[in-house]
Amino acid sequence: MTLAAQFQIEYLQYLGPDGKPVAELPQAFRDASALVPLFKQMLYVRTFDAKAIALQRTGKLGTYASCLGHEATHVGIGASMQADDVFAPSYREYGAQFMRGVKPREVLMYWGGDERGNDFSGPKHDYPWCVPIATQCLHAAGAALAFKLRGEKRVAVTCCGDGGSSKTDTYAAINSAGAYALPFIQCIINNGWAISVPRTAQTGAQTLAQKGLAGGLNCLQVDGNDLIAVLEGMRRAVVRARNGEGGSVIEFMTYRLHDHTTADDARRYRGEDEVKAAWTREPIMRLRNYLTHAGAWNESMETAWTEECAKQVDVEINAYLELKVQPVTAMFDYLYADPPPDLLAQRAAALAAEGKTHG
């Protein structure tokens, strides 16, 4: 028999669920104290997430997509990018966006139904949140093509979930990135469930990382609950992309510890034992144990920082709650330079309805 091709997918993990090293740490991440700022950011993201859910439960926020359990993946992705790189997120990567300067109040505005939340304080060249699954992957590929044509050493990074990796948009982005050797990184955040559909029911691929092989990209699977592994995986991909060596697909193995959104009830499709097992592998506990054992973190430091996180997030929440609500016409004002007649009719009807409400 003659083989036409064969492949292997490398798996990266440096910290076990108990926080103890299971492999020799990369040289760049052997200083435990250097990881403390990123751990603090992970705690900040978790604090924000809990308070956002509380806002939704009390009717002060619309449907909200929790990122509980994804903190290491998100913060690691954000920490690995330069300011002039481009990020094309889905609708859950708050940790990465906070690292890039997006304010929590903007996240709250978005989920509160205020489109101004997409006008980020962070890099204006980053893409807004994208709810249509995986379409943002094509946007990132387009940005990467522009970087290559201009000879710029910039990288385009995008994220999708395990379900999104089965969309044609993702395959098209991967194919373009491979065909033109683009500075493109496709992050697949695999939490095992495409909303209520298990991974086994929506793809027959042995790994999601290997979906990049057909496009000619470098492929890697990473323990997404291990911040060091996330940082190392992203470091490799960023170096390749910035040096003109082409793009990468990285599959981050993690778990969504909350429901898909606050409009979902994951108990209808996920077993209790599965969720309990996932809590034993979660990223914050893992890194906390590692840093504590290394002498870089302790309980008093965490108590003080957790209190500070709560204060900082409350400032953002108050800014969101005090924001003046836009007029009803705002939903029509930024769609067309010259609105079509049917849209103008809808705008007039909305104004009339608003007048009756306030009259």
Image: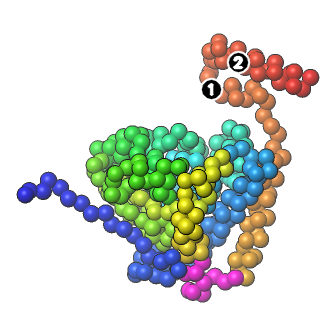
Judge left or right: residue 60 versus residue 153.
right
Protein image colouring = rainbow
Q: Main secondary structure of the magenta part?
A: helix
- In the rendered structure, which amino acid carries the disc numbered 2? Gln
Can residue 72 be seen from the camera position used here? Answer: no
SS type, badge 2: helix
Image quadrant in which you'd find residue 353:
top right
User: Residue 46, relative to residue 195: is it above or below?
Assistant: below
Q: Position of residue 124 (x, y in %)?
A: 59, 45
User: Residue 124, relative to residue 104: is it above or below?
Assistant: above
Image quadrant in which you'd find residue 236:
bottom left
Disc 2 to disc 1, how far (Cα)? 13 Å
Residue 64 falls within the magenta-colored stretch:
no
Residue at the extreme left: 1
* Figure quadrant of the C terminus: top right
Residue at the extreme top: 341
Judge left or right: residue 270 versus residue 209.
right
Residue depicted at x 70% and y 18%: 346
Q: Position of residue 211 (x, y in %)?
A: 34, 51
**Magenta highlight range:** 287-299
Q: Position of residue 226 (x, y in %)?
A: 50, 71
Which residue is denoted by mark 1 in the rendering?
Answer: 335
* Figure quadrant of the N terminus: bottom left
Q: Nearer the viewer, residue 26 or 84?
A: 26
- In the rendered structure, which amino acid carries the disc numbered 1? Leu
Q: Position of residue 190 (x, y in %)?
A: 46, 57
Which residue is denoted by mark 2 in the rendering?
Answer: 346
Can residue 24 be seen from the camera position used here? Answer: yes
Residue depicted at x 73% and y 71%: 306
Q: Categorize mark 2 by other alpha carbons within 10 Å: few (<14), some (14-19), many (20+).
A: few
